[in-house]
Structures are given as C-alpha cells and as structure tokens.
Amino acid sequence: MADLKNELPRLLFDLDVKAGLKNFKKNRYEDFFKAYRDDLSSVYELINETYEMPDKEEKINEAALSLVNKAKNKHENAGFFKKQQTLLDMQCMMVFYVLPGILANGKEDDRMLTDSIVGQWRAAFPDSKIDAASYDELFAGFRNTIFGFSVEDIFSKNK
C-alpha cells in the first residue's frame, strides 16, 4: 500500500501552476477543480484510508510535514529572483486547490489534515498567512456583478 507521506505532496506538485491560475475564474473553476480531484483520486482514497488507521493523527502530521518540506525545498532551490514568485504560486495552489480539495472529501477528519498542513506551512513560511477554505466558500467569492452590471456581460463584450 502506498504511504500518504509520499503521496500527499502530489496534491501540490502534480498541479500545473499556469493552468491552475488560468482556470481560477468563475466560469472555469468548477470544471477544473473537478478534473483536478479526479486526476488525483488515488491520493484522496489514500487520505480516506489513513483516517481509518488507529495512528491516523501521527500519519496525517507526517504527511503534512512531507508536503511542506517538499514545498520548502522547492522554495529554497528556486534561485534568488524566483524565490518569492515560487512561494506565491505555491500558496495560490494551496488555497485554490489543495486545501479545498481535501475539504471536498466530506470527511470529519478533513479539517484535522488541513489544520496540520496550514500549521506546518505557517511554521515553514512565517510570512505566509494561508488558511483552508472549502470549494463552496471560494466559489461564492467570485463576483457576479460590478456596479450592478453582470461580470460575464462586461467581459464578454471585451473579447
């Protein structure tokens, strides 16, 4: 059986940042988020299996640390001029996809995993203020109107 600490980092590192940012728009987010979760369904299954283990809290913390350590390593090796952009990109993917993807499992222990990831992320990157939000919370944050005009109408006229 695969180990969660080896597989959990895939939630961040199997995600193309450019595609993730490009699809973080109201009319694209739902489909991209679903495809992201489908592509990584084996990781979500492993998360759910870990929740059934007697030492689940230890396994969850080890997996969260593994993800954060891999992110920290990528940040440290990014090079002087790309360091901040690398961190910003990873933070966006964490907030837009990784954490909401875990919370979309609908399991009681999902929050324990996201809290562990967020806590260890903040310890590794002290200036980072990420937090976990569900897919529904993020999707509800997309604007429908600007000054009373439909966002879709405004931007469709500019094409």
Image (spheres, rainbow, N blue to C red):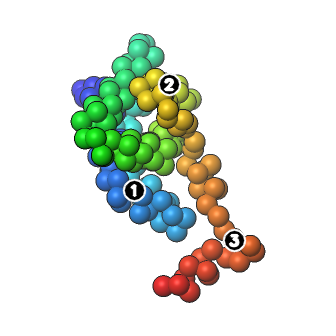
Q: Are marks 3 and 1 in contact (CB under 8 Å)?
A: no
Relative height, residue 89 to residue 99 (above, below): below
Q: Are marks 2 and 1 in contact (CB under 8 Å)?
A: no
**Quadrant, the N terminus:** top left
The residue at the point 45 percent across, 47 percent down is: 92
Type of amino acid at the residue the image marks with label 3:
Ile
Ranked by sequence position, the earlier of labels 2 and 3 is: 2
Q: Which mark is residue 146?
A: 3
Image location of residue 102, percent across then percent down? 47, 38
Ranked by sequence position, the earlier of labels 3 and 1 is: 1
Whether residue 87 is visible to the viewer of this picture, yes or no, is yes
Image location of residue 68, percent across then percent down? 37, 29
The residue at the point 48 percent across, 40 percent down is: 99
Name the residue nearer the viewer: 48 or 74. Answer: 74
Whole-angstrom CA distance, mark 2 to mark 3, is 35 Å
Ranked by sequence position, the earlier of labels 2 and 1 is: 1
Q: Secondary structure at mark 2?
A: helix
Q: Are marks 2 and 3 in contact (CB under 8 Å)?
A: no
- For mark 2, what is the residue? 119
Q: Which mark is residue 90?
A: none
Whether residue 90 is visible to the viewer of this picture, yes or no, is no
As drawn, which residue projects farthest toward the front?
A: 80
Type of amino acid at the residue the image marks with label 2:
Gly
Image location of residue 8, percent across then percent down? 34, 33
Name the residue nearer the viewer: 51 or 133. Answer: 133
Is 48 placed left or right of 156 in the picture?
left
The residue at the point 56 percent across, 86 percent down is: 157
The residue at the point 42 percent across, 45 percent down is: 88
- For mark 1, what is the residue? 20
